[in-house]
Amino acid sequence: MSELYIRVAEDESEEPMEIPSEDDGTILLSSVAAQFPGACGLRYRNPESQCMRGVRLVEGVLHAPENDWGNLVYVVNYPKDNKRKMEEIDAASAVKVKRGFQKTSDLIVLGLPWKTSEQDLKDYFTTFGEVIMVQVKRDLKTGNSKGFGFVRFTEYETQTKVIAQRHMIDGRWCDCKLPNSKASPDEPMRSRKIFVGRCTEDMTTDELRQYFMQYGEVTDVFIPKPFRAFAFVTFADDQVAQALCGEDLIIKGISVHISNAEPKHNNIHQLFPNFPGGSASLAAMFDRSQYQYPSSHV
């Protein structure tokens, strides 16, 4: 018998490949598997019933239906487990590809020492991976550092690693974060205002302003009157404010606690149970000042 080729495809919608038959008109499963690794059989669509039918397989040999392969396109069968594994591999590959195309963003570096230069910043972050850009934000008039800057990496994996930890730069702990503009659209806007607890009466607004300017541009400082042992500081950048929340800082030899400022009507009475005049009086003070009170008071 002259050599015969049958048409085999991985899927009905794909272009078929011709597989050679044996002298007796059968097809070896090994011939199919050589072109379609993992194949365990063949099936075809019955022209009359339009149902899929399996091709008879005996000891590794595929036999033509009714002794005639005809002009049909035969579809490869795979073991279910093998197919599932292949789908899992494809899904994992898709995730890797997706990660590979994730773009890096400019990261804000908070708490930079005054002396840190852009070269110092680049030298430090280059130890994590390739750096595209570094910038230290400076006052336009004086040229002095504002205490924060920006860095951008080539690889997304490097960016993720840098965000996940704190950094000792020129003797000071610094934080790297995604600027608010780069955050998810679903993420709420963060306050630029911090609550400074445990203040002493001899601390002035000018002294607090000068102290907090080392972290970033300060737009306002408010100390309630009569004095209540706390103050509010507002930064130009919300990232600076958020980076300081939870910290204990030393001002004029006194340990003050920094916390977040939240909406005005979050249970004032629980925060300040001994406030003269009660919670109504305290709420009125906040309404007049238009300042927010903290989520916690330490």
Image (tube, helix red, strand yellow):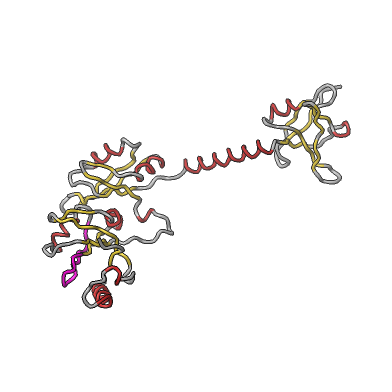
Q: Residue visible at 47% across and 43% down?
A: 101
Q: Residue furthest left?
A: 202
**Residue 191 against residue 84 in the figure, above or below:** below
How many numbered callouts? 0
Q: Residue visible at 34% across and 53% down?
A: 179
Q: Residue visible at 13% across and 65% down?
A: 201
**Residue 238 against residue 7 in the figure, above or below:** below
Q: Which residues are magenta?
A: 217-230
Q: Position of residue 248 (x, y in %)?
A: 23, 54
Q: Residue furthest front?
A: 274
Image quadrant where one finds the N terminus: top right
Specify the quadrant of the image occupied by residue 288. bottom left
Specify the quadrant of the image occupied by residue 217. bottom left
Q: Residue furthest right?
A: 66
Q: Position of residue 157 (x, y in %)?
A: 41, 40
Relative depth, front residue between 234 and 4: 234
Specify the quadrant of the image occupied by residue 244. bottom left
203 relative to 240 in the view: left or right: left
Q: Position of residue 239 (x, y in %)?
A: 30, 55
Q: Position of residue 207 (x, y in %)?
A: 13, 59
Image quadrant where one finds the C terminus: bottom left
203 relative to 108 in the view: left or right: left
Relative depth, front residue between 274 and 239: 274
Relative depth, front residue between 31 and 79: 79
Whether 157 is among the magenta residues is no
Relative depth, front residue between 98 and 83: 83
Q: Residue visible at 50% across and 40% down?
A: 96
